[in-house]
Amino acid sequence: MTSSFDSYNERSQLKTNVVSSDSESSEGFTSTALAAVLHSLSLSLSSTSAVLSDPSQSFHRFLSLSLSLSEFLSLAMRTMELVSASSLLLILWLTVAIEASVHQYNAQRFVAKGNSFVVHGGSEGIYSSSTSSDSSQDSSIRFEKITLRRPKESSNFSSRVHAIVFEVEDRETIGGSAYGGQRAVCCSPDLAKLGVCKQGEIIHRQSTKNPGWPQVFGATFEVDESEATFTSRSIQIAKTGMYNLYFIHCDPSLNDVVVEGKTIWKNPTGYLPGRMAPLMNFYGFMSLAYVILGIYWFSQYARFWKEVIPLQNCITLVITLGMFEMALWYFDYAEFNETGVRPTGITVWAVTFGTIKRTVSRLIILMVSMGYGVVRPTLGGITSKVISLGATFFLASEVLELVENVGAISDLSGKTRLLLVLPVALLDAFFILWIFNSLSATLNKLQDEMESKMKCENCGLHCTAGVYSPKLLKAYVSRNVYLPGARRIMLKLDIYRKFTNALVVAVVVSVGWICYELYFKANDVYNELWQNAWIIPAFWQVLSFSVLCIICILWAPSHNSMRYAYSGDEDFDRDDTLTLIKPASMPSNDIRSPADAHESQGGKGLSNSDPEEGKTA
């Protein structure tokens, strides 16, 4: 998101044509990418709805709508070539160019914005100072050793550079226009003729809402001097708001001037920027939530460790990674709040654990959707594709998270963020497509196997050829009718339907939240809603945790966990068409228990019931 001053200049038409065209192309590219992702999600959801309503036709319908998986994966791999080639250099750069609430200026050059030249010094949400007498709880922006340097060959004249600190509500107090024309930050000849200002000076006036603001002060280059220094000072913050700092000059002759030094931004509770401060408590609560979930899961795991299936081992890994991730994020924010400098090591580990968790979670959901360990013992020839997709997602997500968290506090530029966000968004969309595609196929397999178990020759019931009915099966099972393997398949089918419903709800909620996030950012051009910005990243953590809890409930270790595992007795790949059953038009008392069926058929030797039942009849 652009800073408030950049947004203000853009709306005042002070940006150059090059910057404007870049912004428009980035917005168009973002809209196209978002439309593609949402279209993919809609196809996935419509296909899944078809699976639940008409399993026999949904799989073919899905294939006719979605892209080829191999083609999409190839496209994703090509998209990531540029990112993977520069990822190592990017990570090395991040470890050097670290900023925090202590904003460092390392020979930063001024950039032309309209008729002015600016350096963005920082933008942070700051809460008002505490009412207590403790000075450590005061909010402030402190200037320390801010030095301006210019080449000696350009030091034959005097000039002045200003620093402007303003709250976002006071943005209209900076700049002006003559006769309703283009708004300018520096005094133009037309404004000078009106007597409003002196040509070459910065236009600003006092705020009616915040007396004494904006704060404007400067440093002067004297003749034959190549350095100018801002007086060290501390600006106290008495009002909660989004504060911006810019260094500005209006002299085109001051080319090659650079800014060095630092400013320190502080909130009453510490050095965490205002929009990040609530996240420290949030990650503390999330750490506690993962601990509670871990206690439940590990206790079940320890009780039934002999019945544990491979899928439950994977869930254990995800819970463990989540516990480490939340704890590391909490300590990262706590250290940042205490010192004002973000701890590189803790941040990198938190990002890495989080990226591994997200990658493993997606791969587990994908493999479960394929029926791995449930309807098929291996992934077969697609194992390499699954691994490639996971590795690509890990790399793209790791680079994005490192850039967003191990770097400057101010938001990334639109083009830089787009370059990093787009591959992750495309890969996420592909994961969703593949997951629901696989779920469709797995549900069909379970459906076919259930129908095969209901063949007339296997159940010893009065039935006729027809279509499988779940209600009929439940009626048989509830009355203890002996159906070889049917109960096991029914349990698998039931859990997969619940799993599918949970994923559909998660995707629908995600799409809704993406739309809200776009609305939020579109209506927060100047970062005025910074106090609520923490909710956006927090929501994704809560949603991820909720899906994990649902999976833990569905696949919790128990004394009969093995009923969900793949069995060699179940043939999910048979191609032959089997005769299915449906109840004939007979009285309800025709649904009989095994003993009744054996009794009525015993004289003819046609019983298909359990041999043990014959002994006890």
Image (cartoon, rainbow, N blue to C red):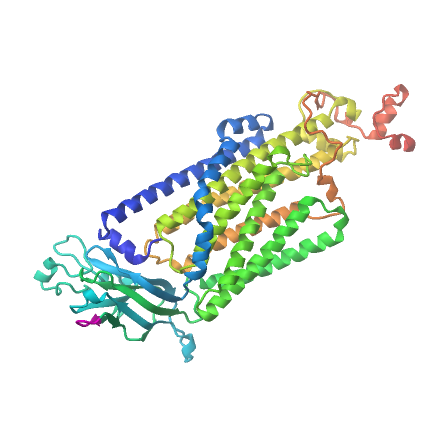
Pick the front one: 461 or 57 = 57
The reply to whether residue 448 is in sight is: yes
Pick the front one: 390 or 435 = 390
8 falls in the magenta region: no
Query: Which segment is the magenta one?
Result: 220-225
Pick the front one: 128 or 141 = 141
The reply to whether residue 462 is in sight is: no
Q: Residue at x 55, y 26 (%)?
A: 60
List the single residue furthest toward the front.
153
Pick the front one: 184 or 542 = 184
Quadrant in the rendering for residue 120:
bottom left
Q: Residue at x 57, y 28 (%)?
A: 59
Quadrant in the rendering for residue 132:
bottom left
Q: Is residue 120 left or right of residue 354?
A: left
The chief SS type of the magenta part is loop
List the single residue furthest toward the right.
615
Residue 562 pos. (x, y %): 74, 42
Q: Is residue 385 above or below residue 524?
A: above
222 falls in the magenta region: yes
Q: Quadrant of the C terminus?
A: top right
Residue 601 pos. (x, y %): 86, 22
Q: Is residue 580 left or right of residue 407?
A: right
Q: Is residue 327 above or below residue 422?
A: below
List the single residue furthest toward the left.
193
Residue 376 pos. (x, y %): 67, 34
